[in-house]
Image: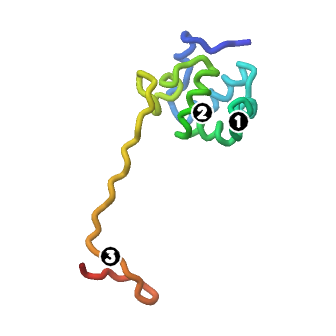
Amino acid sequence: MVMVTVMDMNDIPQDPLVRPGWIVAALHEHGDSVAELARRHGVAAQNISAAIHHRSSERIERAIAERLGIRPHALFPERFDADDLRIRLPRPQPTKRQGKVVKAGQGEQRAAG
């Protein structure tokens, strides 16, 4: 069985669009699967897949990294900083509205004020 080790980190694709396939293959090399990892952590396989493919659950992302023996930052550099702390995305700021939108029959028009 091939194990992913610290020396293999250069093999982790940096392209987030390519990395999911690499992660699934690495799980298989460890004798695991998305479904098995999901059962072990008490979640649906879709939750594991979501964590692999896009930002999802920090707990699941950490579990995937732990299963592969890789630091979260090395596996998901866009999601974790160098200290393996979750990168918090800024919340979008609300935009200031000039007026209220009111429905008027078929169309909409802006009301003053």
Camera-nearest residue between 76 and 60: 60
Q: What residue type is labelled 1?
A: Gly
Does residue 29 appear left or right of residue 110 in this picture?
right
> What count of labels does the image hold?
3
In the rendered image, which residue does mark 3 sit on? 100
- From the top left corner, tell me how far across and down residue 64 is, in percent: 61, 27
**Residue 8 percent location from the top left of the image:** 57, 13
> Of the residues under marks 1 and 2, which one precedes in the sequence?
1
Alpha carbon of mark 3 to alpha carbon of mark 1: how far?
46 Å
Question: Going 64% across and 21% down the picture, which residue do you hit?
Answer: 67
Residue on which the image places disc 2: 60
The residue under the point 59% across, 12% down is 5
In this image, 100 relative to 68: left or right? left
Give the label on residue 42, or none: 1
Label 3 amino acid? Answer: Lys
Which image quadrant: the N terminus? top right
Vertical placement of 4 versus 18: above or below? above
- Which quadrant of the structure image shows residue 13? top right
Residue at the image position 54 percent from the left and 16 percent from the top: 9
